[in-house]
Amino acid sequence: MKISVTLIAGNEEDRIGDALASVAWADEIIVVVDARSTDRTAEIARQYTDRVFVHPWSGYAAQKRFADAQATHEWIFSLDADERVSPELRRSIERLKREGPRHDGYRVARRAWYLGRWIQHSGWYPDYQLRLYRRDRARWVGDYVHESVRVEGSVGTLEGDLWHLTRRSLSEHHEVLNRYTTLAAEEAFAHGKRAGWFALCVRPLLAFLRSYVLRQGFRDGIPGLVISGFAAYYVFLKNAKLWERAHFPEGWGHPLATE
């Protein structure tokens, strides 16, 4: 059982090195760098592998499909630049390679580092992600945002965590949230969804309660409160943008334009 690790990145010069170092055990490493990237991401990646491709951005899922297409081995482990394979997860993968796979895909528990601590609740842990899969039985879907891989066949679970370093600051978290809500609103609009009073007033509150109460975000202290607040804000902003998209497809206009 040989494994190709694939990673897509753009402007990640401060994080990609550690990510690739955590998968030095791989039989092959494929890095696809967004052609819009302006930093040393590609240069640093070439210190770990000669299989670095600069490719025009085509959406999250499409970019990952391109990365998978460059792999030469049957099995693929998909990694992001802000993630690290923990020693325990590495041992689990090495054991799987020795004993042989019994499934067509494997999910891993992802543990997030946020505001100076590992998050244990808030709906952020164990945050299972399907990352190891047989390439001929899997396909990435979801080109707008929140891409995921679908496997035709059985799925098992590996021991050990995938460390997720999430955001560097609350400002970065807000910037990412703003970008993702735009993509999510466009995707919802394309699928015929619309937003009204309920989506703007009730759903954000439900999102907060789900994260803070049902998923015990209160046990994560202030970081849990912040996560739950952002969860509510994400739902509100996505639906506000969806409402805006439906009512102002050409923009807000100008009050003097009709005078």
Image (cartoon, helix red, strand yellow):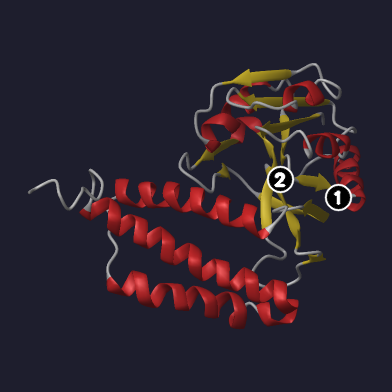
Disc sitting over residue 71 in the figure: none
Q: Residue at x 81, y 64 (%)?
A: 116
Within 10 Å of disc 1 (Cα), the crowding (few <14, some 14-19, many 20+) is some
Q: Circle 1 sits in a helix, a strand or a loop, which is it? A: helix
Secondary element at tag 2: loop
| Residue 225, quarter of picture | bottom right
Indicate the position of residue 253 as horizontal and vertical percent values: 21, 48
User: What residue did someone put label 1 on?
Assistant: 89
Which quarter of the rendered picture does the N terminus lie within? top right
Residue type beneath disc 1:
Leu
Q: Pinpoint residue 33: horizontal percent, then vertical percent.
A: 66, 26
| Residue 237 visible to the viewer | yes
Q: Residue at x 63, y 52 (%)?
A: 172
Tell which tag, 1 or 2, sits nearer the viewer.
Answer: 1
* View extreme (top): residue: 50
Of callouts 1 and 2, which one flags the residue occurring earlier in the amino acid sequence? 1
Q: Is residue 143 left or right of residue 43?
A: left
Q: Position of residue 223 (x, y in %)?
A: 71, 71
In the displayed structure, would residue 188 be above or below residue 21?
below
Name the residue beneath numbered marker 2. Answer: 103
Q: Which one is nearer the viewer's eye here, 169 or 15? A: 169
Q: Measured along the vertical axis of the image, is residue 168 above or below residue 197? A: above
Mark 2 is on which residue type? His
Q: Is residue 193 visible?
A: no
Q: What residue is drawn where x is 68% and y is 39%?
A: 133
